[in-house]
């Protein structure tokens, strides 16, 4: 692996950057791997990386239908945080957040993880109690969270509408200072490059078309690049989990929905923090490029189309302007939509399936990006050991059958109601 | 945003409607636990045609059966809840 | 210097109407009809802005919405619009525009020094450096953020108006060039109701630049006649209106700019309007955009698209250069050359990359060959110059490198049909290898593309394709044929074709590090090559790695040039390397117009109880509850919330209090099967309820969790009245409908949502019965959990004897429109007995003390009835929604969170705090609601504790690290007042 550093950038710059070589290889698939990961998104690539790095399992292939990072890794609002109320969730996301903090150095790839703070606004005294409860739950587990007064918010986000006449007046907030944003594409590329350097085969344009299951056990997959054998197979295709699981005759507690997001044209810095709200479901941040990144509710009906409904975007625009009135004359530049794996309690699934040696990582709803390193690490652990780690043990697939669901919002088994 | 032809109200924007669930996930009150669990928690989640239960919540409030493609959004049929389509597959 | 480059005549500007405006603080003059770009170009301004990354000087490249470089800030204060294209801003009196991304000034931009280190900061350089912990990255990032961004951030709220309008039509035509007008005429002549949308301020499209003769008329006359005809047939013409998005089932969003960016609106206060159009058929006549070419310095001020040069000359009367070099791969640039020559410019050279044998035979080319220096097989290697503009060009002519002195380079790299809306609508494309253009292939919706957007070449083809599209659309709608049978026809001399011969290869001597593909984002051909070398070979990887096509122009001029570069590296044809996705919007759209009226105070509805004004007169503290606003407390004198709430709750415990409970969910359930229906919805016994009696009840979700609680009353044998929580009322309404219509269609029962029909006052306290009987007569007060009827203040009312506070209490229901006198009488009577009004805060204190649960508090969507200590209420026989799912093993886990009470041993229990056994321990529960013992004082709370019912007597800490509060608490049963329920009895 060519080392990345300012010095090497300078040296190779002198040669017109002609000597940079491929960040990862373009290998043909081997006939057999110890582990096959289906899905070359951030989670799948991270899984492969940690399999090789932590567990020494290097005979690994990541099979990607299109281009790596082309699914939800490349279609999100890049927010990283661990400020959840339910213990199983904040423990999982905090584990991930800690990995984010060392990721650029670990991968020798700058993923631009910026801890600019993730803020939830409260709009009533009862909002503030719920935020305090969330913060207290986090703080008891050693996770950072601080309540913010109106005066502190005014200083942190001068453009925020703090008037009492607002439809949802801001009365305070809860900030996780270590939360923030990262460069989403770089996460996929960084993991691919680092995994590749450890011997992992990252195989693009290789769609899995079937599974070779014998006697209840998976022994390989059929792909557009031929049949490939494997001792163990991990599905990691959030957005399409149901489609891939169907190849193993599995039905999942997952419905595919669509989540839209959009950015404004770039302007000079105006918002330094990731802003979310307890009463208004929209989230706002500003990218390093200067674009205001906006997202909100999903489209509320099952679809694989990646064609969003315009009224959702319009709603988010109204919400954003209500919070920050100066956004009104900024222009939406680009919008996108991602197919999300909506699970039936709002929490992910990482663990075994009823098919021997076939594992599942999915159901991330619209919260998967922030989990990328933690999810990869824990999935790698689960695939290497054949058993979940304590942190992902609660996220087993059979929890719906037993009733041990992890329901952050308490919305119940209606995927689109959360 | 879809255009849904409500049998009572005519063509109306999707904003007036609420998706409820796939028809196959309707759980009868007396459903036994082994049958209830898959209906409550599993989905075929098809990429293509699907029979679904919607409600014209912000219109006539009727419950409607939609035969809708989840990939290209074509709506093949909209029926009232009591109606069965020709061929009877809903 | 004033309008030095303006021609004395010609063009569509009105020289009699001078408009003064400012650019970077300097006053300029232009004419009515000018864009900011044309007015400044006429004044000899060449430098408009600085590029995103290297701060390179940039001028005007285009004459329309595709402009990547000439971006300005327009307007001031709340009307300031950053990143406004100078080419898409028609000047108005008082316009103030400023250049962007420069410091301290456009001419002297200190950040342009970045250019010096450009060899070391190629595409994606930031991925390879700035390592260290996130804190260190954030130091670098701070400076990167300052340097990035383009325009200044807005600081002030926008007070102007935005609105949404819905419209329907048979045929929507997007674009009013010759194809669009012909299409609209054909559809309209066939009887279709037409909407024609044009992003420009005038109809005509390319005819505004290249006048022609159509159907024997001058094109201006033809456009005017077409306009008259369309309007006469009831069509709607929207100018300055861009079709920004094409969505499902024929829905398009059109954005109408009622005012120009930064301009004060008229009397209606309206700045922009969003049209939501459902169209039966859509015709996309969106034209084509000219592409630049690769040579070093192709971004210098004074390098412009050939068509733009002609537009500035013909439409705005501005000759943008005196000594001109043209470089082209098609015949269209010859029209530019001829027009310039006619206007007195010197054509230094026309460099045509086609071989002489492959060149076209348009009239313009033939004319140019006779009088202008045309070189076939020739290319540009480099443009030389400075921020002041181009000074010379280095060309490859006949294999020789030749220096050409010039002040303008007009470039044409062929034309890309505008296929954005077609693609947004789900269409597919076909590739023309000769012209190097994608044009629409298969349509997925009721839509066709016409004119240059469909690949038509020449005015004749364009008019015909538009006409045919219009007829086809009308036919598809089942309309009768047009009365006019032939398409509009142009004079032969005007029917000039381009005959583009795409040539993606720059001259071999080209310095690719200075050959820009994406001008705004400073992406060069060398950057694309680097990305490819490093393995970013998918078109999406290349785009994301280099930021190609991600600037405010969304790659309108650059995407195909970049794609071709990738295809070249891959050694594959262009279509096989793929295309990035086209998504809305076509051009950027303000968040303000997207939001329309639905922002600020109108973000979501604000529901007010019918007694809102009556409460307001008491100056209460209000509390938002979902959409509702309800009184939280009625402070007297200088009381704060807590003092007021304590006084109010004490009044309820000792005398009497009155509160407004009008917002509760309320349902009439009527019919022979009413009881049977309620037994499906309610988890408690309902069927055995005697007429005139009521009961507390729970409703479960299908997964067994408690969804809501309320009371159910048997009003008559086959008539029940069901109440549910305020916040859950809409959900309950949908749930009842679902059970009734979907699960139990066979039942003979009607369910009506009567939430808004009834308003109600709750009277609670030891003197509550006295209030009722004083008002309604001896014996009028029903006993606890019974109901009665009777007139109060002359109004018929229903009385439910139910208690949430723990005291003897009555809810008096009257029709909403008649509640006023009822409320007044009750309040007067209660006050006479020493009582007072109480709000939600007192209600909260009272219910906590009594151990009553609340939706959104203890009913949190994760709790079963058993978790809430109410398991014994459930009908053991089941048969209700949620019964079966309770059979799952985790539902009876003894370590589930169970409702408990907490009494403070020391300190005040913080609401929402965590319960821990020792410092540093993992929380074993939490406090859901904290209050006080109303009469004796002392901090009490309700909470959830793992296996809590088995831990009564345990001492825990309720800790709130975020508030730095903690209390020692004892676990007790969740009821602190009147365990036996004596207070309910008379």
Image (cartoon, coloured by chain):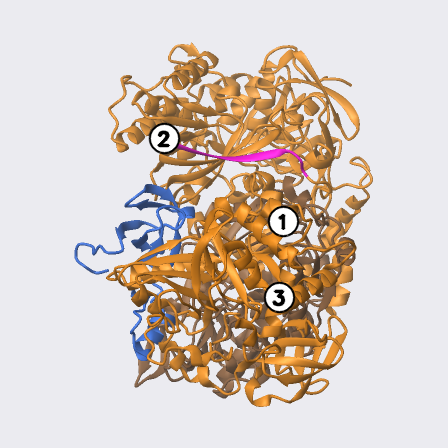
Chain colours: A brown, B blue, C orange
Which subunit holds the residue at mark 1?
Answer: C
Q: Specify the farthest residue to the left.
A: B87
Numbered badge on residue C214:
none
Q: What span is in magenta?
A: C158-168
Which residue bears the numbered disc 1?
A: C615
Upstream in sequence: badge 2 or badge 1: 2
Which subunit holds the residue at mark 2?
Answer: C
Q: Nearer the viewer, residue C747 or C116?
A: C747
Rendering coords of residue A354 (x, y %):
37, 82
Q: Give the SS element for disc 1.
A: helix
The image quarter containing residue C591 is: top right
Which residue bears the numbered disc 3?
A: C844
Rendering coords of residue C666 (x, y %):
44, 57
Q: Give the SS element for disc 3.
A: helix
In the rendered structure, the answer to whether residue A164 lies left or right of residue B13 reads right
Distance (Cα) linking label 1 and label 3: 19 Å
Q: Nearer the viewer, residue A160 or A26?
A: A160
Q: Quadrant of the N terminus of chain A?
A: bottom right
Numbered badge on residue C171:
2
């Amino acid at each position: 692996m060519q080392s990345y550093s300012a010095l090497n950038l300078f040296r190779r710059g002198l040669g017109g950057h002609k000597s940079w070589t491929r960040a990862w290889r373009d290998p043909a698939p081997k006939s057999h791997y110890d582990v096959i990961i289906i899905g070359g998104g951030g989670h799948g690539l991270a899984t492969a990386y940690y399999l090789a790095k932590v567990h020494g399992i290097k005979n690994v292939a990541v099979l990607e239908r299109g281009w790596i990072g082309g699914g939800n890794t490349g279609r999100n609002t890049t927010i990283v945080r661990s400020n959840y109320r339910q213990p199983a969730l904040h423990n999982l996301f905090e584990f991930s957040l800690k990995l984010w903090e060392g990721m650029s150095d670990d991968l020798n790839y700058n993923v631009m993880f910026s801890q600019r703070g993730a803020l939830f606004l409260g709009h009533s005294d009862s909002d503030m109690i719920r935020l305090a409860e969330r913060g207290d739950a986090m703080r008891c587990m050693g996770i950072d969270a601080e309540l913010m007064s109106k005066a502190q918010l005014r200083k942190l986000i001068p453009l925020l509408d703090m008037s009492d006449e607002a439809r949802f007046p801001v009365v305070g907030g809860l900030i996780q200072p270590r939360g923030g944003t990262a460069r989403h594409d770089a996460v996929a590329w960084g993991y691919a490059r680092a995994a590749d350097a450890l011997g992992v085969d990252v195989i693009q344009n290789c769609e899995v078309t079937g599974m070779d299951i014998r006697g209840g056990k998976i022994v390989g997959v059929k792909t557009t690049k031929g049949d490939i054998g494997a001792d163990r197979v991990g599905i990691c295709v959030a957005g399409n989990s149901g489609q891939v699981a169907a190849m193993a005759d599995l039905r999942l507690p997952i419905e595919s929905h669509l989540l839209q997001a959009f950015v404004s044209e770039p302007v000079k810095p105006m918002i330094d923090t990731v802003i979310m709200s307890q009463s208004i479901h929209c989230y706002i941040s500003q990218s390093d490029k200067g674009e205001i990144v906006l997202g909100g509710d999903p489209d509320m009906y099952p679809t694989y189309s990646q064609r969003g409904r315009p009224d959702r975007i319009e709603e988010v625009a109204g919400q954003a302007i209500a919070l920050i009135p100066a956004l009104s004359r900024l222009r939406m530049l680009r919008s996108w939509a991602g197919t999300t794996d909506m699970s039936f309690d709002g929490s992910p699934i990482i663990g075994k399936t009823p098919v021997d040696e076939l594992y599942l990582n999915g159901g991330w709803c619209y919260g998967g990006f922030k989990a990328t390193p933690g999810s990869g690490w824990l999935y790698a652990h689960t695939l290497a050991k054949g058993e979940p780690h304590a942190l992902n043990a609660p996220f087993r697939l059979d929890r719906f059958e037993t009733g041990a669901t992890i329901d952050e919002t308490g919305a119940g088994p209606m995927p689109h109601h959360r | 945003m879809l255009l849904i032809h409500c049998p009572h109200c005519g063509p109306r924007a999707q904003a007036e409607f609420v998706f409820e669930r796939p028809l196959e996930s309707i759980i009868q009150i007396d459903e036994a636990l082994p049958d209830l669990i898959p209906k409550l928690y599993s989905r075929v989640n098809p990429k293509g045609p699907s029979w679904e239960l919607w409600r014209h919540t912000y219109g006539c409030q009727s419950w409607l059966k939609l035969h809708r493609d989840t990939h290209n959004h074509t709506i093949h049929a909209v029926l009232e809840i009591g109606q069965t389509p020709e061929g009877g597959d809903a | 210097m004033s309008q030095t480059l303006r021609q004395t005549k010609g063009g569509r500007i009105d020289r009699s109407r001078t408009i003064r405006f400012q650019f970077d603080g300097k006053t300029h003059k232009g004419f009515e009809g000018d864009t900011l770009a044309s007015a400044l170009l006429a004044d000899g301004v060449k430098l408009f802005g600085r590029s995103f990354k290297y701060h390179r000087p940039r001028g005007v490249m285009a004459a329309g919405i595709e402009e990547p470089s000439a971006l300005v800030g327009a307007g001031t204060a709340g009307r300031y619009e950053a990143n406004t294209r100078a080419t898409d801003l028609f000047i108005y009196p008082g316009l103030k525009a400023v250049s962007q991304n420069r410091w301290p000034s456009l001419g002297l931009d200190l950040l342009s020094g970045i250019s010096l280190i450009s060899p070391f900061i190629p595409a994606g350089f930031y991925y390879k450096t700035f390592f260290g912990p996130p804190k260190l990255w954030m130091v670098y990032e701070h400076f990167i953020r300052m340097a990035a961004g383009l325009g200044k951030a807005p600081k002030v709220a926008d007070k102007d108006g935005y609105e949404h309008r819905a419209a329907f039509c048979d045929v929507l035509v997007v674009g009013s060039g010759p194809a669009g007008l012909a299409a609209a005429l054909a559809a309209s002549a066939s009887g279709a109701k037409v909407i024609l949308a044009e992003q420009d301020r005038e109809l005509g499209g390319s005819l505004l630049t290249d006048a022609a003769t159509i159907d024997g008329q001058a094109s201006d006359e033809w456009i005017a006649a077409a306009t008259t005809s369309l309007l006469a047939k009831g069509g709607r013409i929207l100018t300055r209106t861009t079709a920004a998005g094409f969505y499902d089932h024929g829905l398009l969003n059109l954005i109408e700019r009622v005012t120009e960016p930064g301009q004060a609106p008229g009397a209606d206060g309206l700045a922009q309007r969003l049209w939501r159009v459902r169209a039966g058929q859509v015709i996309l006549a969106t034209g084509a955009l000219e592409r630049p070419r690769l040579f070093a310095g192709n971004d210098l001020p004074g390098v412009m698209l050939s068509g733009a040069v002609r537009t500035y000359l013909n439409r705005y009367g501005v000759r943008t250069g005196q000594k001109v070099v043209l470089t082209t791969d098609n015949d269209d640039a010859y029209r530019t050359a001829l027009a310039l020559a006619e206007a007195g410019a010197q054509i230094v050279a026309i460099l045509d990359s086609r071989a002489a044998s492959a060149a076209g035979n348009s009239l313009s080319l033939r004319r140019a060959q006779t009088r202008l220096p045309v070189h076939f097989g020739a290319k540009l290697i480099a443009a030389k110059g400075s921020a002041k503009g181009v000074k010379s060009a280095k060309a490859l002519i006949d294999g020789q490198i030749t220096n050409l002195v010039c002040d303008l380079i007009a470039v044409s790299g062929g034309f890309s049909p505008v296929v954005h809306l077609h693609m947004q609508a789900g269409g597919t494309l076909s590739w023309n290898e000769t012209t190097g253009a994608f044009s629409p292939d298969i349509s997925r919706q009721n839509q066709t593309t016409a004119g240059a957007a469909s690949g038509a070449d020449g005015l004749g083809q364009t008019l015909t394709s538009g006409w045919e599209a219009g007829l086809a659309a009308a036919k598809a709608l089942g309309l009768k044929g047009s009365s006019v049978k032939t398409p509009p026809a142009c004079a032969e001399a005007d029917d000039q074709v381009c005959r583009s011969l795409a040539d993606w290869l720059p001259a071999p001597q080209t310095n690719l590090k200075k050959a820009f593909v994406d001008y705004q984002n400073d992406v060069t051909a060398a950057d694309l090559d680097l990305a490819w070398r490093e393995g970013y070979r998918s078109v999406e990887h290349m785009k994301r790695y280099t930021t190609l096509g991600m600037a405010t122009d969304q790659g309108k001029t650059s995407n195909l040039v970049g794609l071709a570069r990738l295809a070249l590296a891959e050694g594959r044809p262009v279509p096989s390397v793929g295309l990035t996705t086209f998504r809305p919007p076509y051009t950027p759209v303000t968040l303000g117009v997207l939001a329309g009226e639905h922002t600020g105070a109108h973000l979501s509805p604000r529901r007010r109880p019918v007694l809102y004004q009556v409460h307001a007169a008491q100056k209460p503290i209000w509390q938002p509850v979902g959409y509702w606003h309800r009184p939280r407390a009625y402070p007297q004198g200088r009381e704060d919330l807590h003092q007021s709430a304590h006084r109010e709750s004490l009044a309820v415990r000792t005398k009497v209090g009155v509160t407004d409970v009008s917002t509760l969910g309320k349902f009439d359930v009527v019919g022979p099967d009413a009881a049977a229906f309620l037994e499906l919805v309610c988890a408690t016994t309902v069927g055995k309820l005697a007429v005139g009696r009521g009961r507390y009840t729970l409703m479960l979700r299908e997964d067994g969790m408690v969804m809501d609680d309320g009371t159910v009353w048997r009003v008559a044998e086959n008539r029940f009245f069901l109440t549910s929580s305020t916040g859950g009322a809409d959900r309950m309404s949908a749930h009842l409908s679902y059970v009734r219509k979907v699960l139990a269609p066979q039942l003979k029962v009607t369910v009506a949502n009567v939430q808004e029909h009834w308003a109600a006052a709750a009277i609670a306290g030891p003197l509550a019965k006295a209030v009722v009987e004083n008002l309604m007569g001896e014996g009028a007060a029903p006993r606890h959990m019974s109901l009665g009827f009777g007139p109060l203040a002359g109004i018929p009312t229903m009385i439910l004897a139910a208690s949430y506070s723990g005291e003897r209490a009555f809810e008096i229901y009257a029709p909403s429109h008649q509640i006023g006198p009822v409320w007044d009488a009750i309040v007067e009577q209660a006050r006479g007995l020493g009582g007072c009004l109480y709000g939600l805060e007192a209600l909260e204190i009272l219910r906590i003390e009594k151990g009553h649960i609340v939706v959104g508090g203890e009913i949190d969507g994760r709790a079963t009835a058993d978790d809430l200590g109410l398991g014994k209420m459930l009908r053991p026989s089941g048969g209700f929604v949620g019964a079966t799912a309770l059979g799952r093993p985790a539902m009876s886990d003894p370590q589930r969170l169970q409702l408990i009470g907490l009494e403070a041993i020391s300190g005040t229990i913080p609401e929402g705090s965590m319960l821990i056994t020792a410092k540093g321990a993992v929380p074993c529960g939490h406090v859901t609601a904290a209050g006080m013992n109303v009469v004796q004082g002392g901090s009490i709370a309700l909470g959830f504790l793992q296996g809590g019912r088995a831990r009564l007597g345990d001492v825990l800490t309720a800790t709130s690290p975020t508030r730095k509060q903690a209390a020692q608490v004892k676990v007790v049963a969740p009821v602190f007042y009147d365990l036996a329920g004596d207070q309910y009895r008379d």
